[in-house]
Amino acid sequence: MHDIGFIRDLAIVMLVAGATTVLLHRLRLPVLPGYILAGVLIGPHTPGVFVTNPRTIDDISNLGVVLLMFTLGLEFSVRKLREVGGGILLVAVAEVAFMLWVGYELGRVFGWSGRDALFLGAIMSLSSTMVATRTLRESGMRQRPFARLVVGMLVAEDMLTIVILTLLTAVAIGGAVQTGMALSLIGHLGLFVVVGMLAGLLLVPRLVDYVASFGNNEMLLVSVLGICFGASLLAAWLGFSVALGAFLAGAVVAEARCATRVVHLVEPLRDMFAALFFVAIGLKIDPAVLVDYIVPALAIAAVVIVGKTLACSVGCFFVGHDVRTAMCAGMSMAQIGEFSFVIATLGLSLGAVSHFIYPIAVASALICMVSAPYMARSADGVIRLGRRVTPRALRLLVSSYSGWLENLRPVEDNAVIAAMLRRLLWHIAVNVILIVTLFTIGAYVNAHGWDLFSRVGIYRNLRHTLIWATALFLSLPFLIAVYRKAEALGMLLAELGIRERFAGSYTQAIRQVLARLIPLAALLLLALLVGALGSTILPPRGVALSLLAVVLVLAVVLWRALVRVHARLQAALRDTLDKSLDESGH
């Protein structure tokens, strides 16, 4: 009887979704919010209900989540990530981190618990791929220059989705944000993601291409859906989210040579299960509860729209795009959607968040979805208004910065200098990775070797002091190398970017300021990096400040010796690589 009931409820959901699609298309209104409202109307909290079985609602929702996350994973690929570019990837990472922090702080302002606030930050941090791409397509803006930036940031956010889902699952299962159990679960989840991606990239694309070689579309579709549900089942069996398994499956299938054909086959299923997913969201919503939380929902939606617009616009501008393009890209990213629902569902299913998180997430996302088309269409008007109210001095500063970035672009005249820039940035990145590795080893020793320290009478504070001081001292050659490379980078950027036609008589002064600011900024970022990496092994504040003072004195006294040590390490590494290349050449 349950099977018949499920088919009946599924039929009702599909009929309502079909009618909603036709009606909203005729009214020229967004379809996705319409699906949610249709789900509310036929759900168990509305008079004259059609779908009441909670198990059916959960089954439909889970089915929609699996297929939706699989198709979103198909749109993400390592190849696309390489095409995004380092600048846009950096903008996406900074924007997601900023919104995660803003959402967490907003939750604390509301008086919510730490986990509720953390999940709110995650809900607010990820833009909706479906809403953004549909808005671009339906408004006829897919060919405009900013659309490429939007797609690039969405692809980068898809990558960050894996990280966020992994961390939130660990926090939810561990029962607290800072417990050792949560850290252990993060390690297990990270291992699952890494092993799953590596094994998947080695095996799944070849398997999919082999199946595709038979030329049978039915065989190919059934096979990739089997991979999708198999990965979801494996993730659930290991105690993780089915959404995470489905997304990883889509990401590895996307690396197959026949990925375009797979996407074409899966597109109808994507549209159908997207409708199922959004209608199922509406089925879970109690309108009375929605009304009770409308004020925080409005506040969250406003913060999302303003915060994402500013973060993405400023980020795109700083990596080299003009104001109009950056602003249009930022306003197109100013929404949340399917990932927010997945995160809220994850928190509820694992009992990690309060019951009000889900309706608030839905209400906030609905407001953002409805406003998205109007935001995209009003971008040009907002830019014109901004130009009228912006002071002349600020406009001059913006145009000077754009001109400076234009001078930094690798063209024939400065191709050699561009190669020097890349080499400096590469050296900085390698040294930062070595610093991260040292502090990661320190955290690992602290977590897994504490009993060895205890046997010789070294307990928590002294253990943290010894490990942190050792990691910091061993990092000194690399920290100094980063500072020296940043100093050279500052001088090079100042000479290359500050031209007399922009700065006039202030050219030399501005060059000197810029040449000093870049290494100082590098020092600040290094201090934040060391603080973040050493947070789990940080000694008491007074001891930490004393150690920092000692290390600074050592750095000044031993500067030349540490520079020589780093040079020898760099030469040894280069010799090893050269020998490896020679041996492979023979």
Image (cartoon, grey):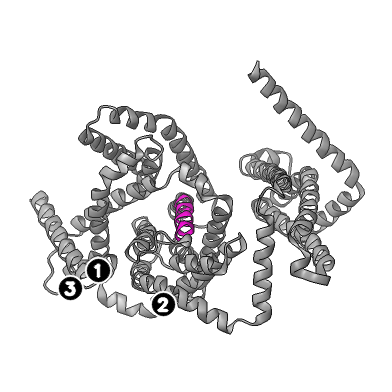
Which residue, given by chain and number where applicable, does mark 1 sit on? 34
The residue sitting at 51% across, 81% down in the picture is 385
Which residue, given by chain and number where applicable, does mark 2 sit on? 296
| Percent x, y of residue 217 | 23, 35
Residue 313 in sight here:
yes
Q: Residues within 10 Å of mark 1 (few under 14, many from 20)?
A: many
Using the numbered discs, state the Cα–Cα distance from disc 2 to disc 3 in whole angstroms.
23 Å
Whether residues under marks 2 and 3 lie with C-beta atoms below 8 angstroms apart, the answer is no
| Percent x, y of residue 354 | 38, 66
Identity, as a three-letter code, of the amino acid under mark 2: Pro
| Percent x, y of residue 206 | 38, 29
Q: Is residue 95 above or below residue 305?
A: above
| Residue nearest the observer in this picture, 222 or 328 | 328
The main secondary structure of the magenta stretch is: helix
Identity, as a three-letter code, of the amino acid under mark 1: Gly
Q: Is residue 237 above or below residue 322?
A: above
Whether residues under marks 2 and 1 lie with C-beta atoms below 8 angstroms apart, the answer is no
- Residue 389 quadrant: bottom right
> Which of the labelled discs sits on residue 291, or is there none?
none
Q: Residue furthest top?
A: 586
Q: Is residue 419 above or below residue 206?
A: below
Which residue, given by chain and number where applicable, does mark 3 sit on? 46
Q: Is residue 84 magenta?
A: no
Using the numbered discs, state the Cα–Cα distance from disc 3 to disc 1 in whole angstroms.
16 Å
The residue sitting at 11% across, 72% down in the picture is 48
Residue at disc 2, secondary structure: helix
Badge nearest the viewer, 2 or 1: 1
Report whether 54 appears left or right of 333. Answer: left
Residues shaded magenta: 147-161
Whether residues under marks 3 and 1 lie with C-beta atoms below 8 angstroms apart, the answer is no
Using the numbered discs, state the Cα–Cα distance from disc 2 to disc 1 in whole angstroms.
22 Å
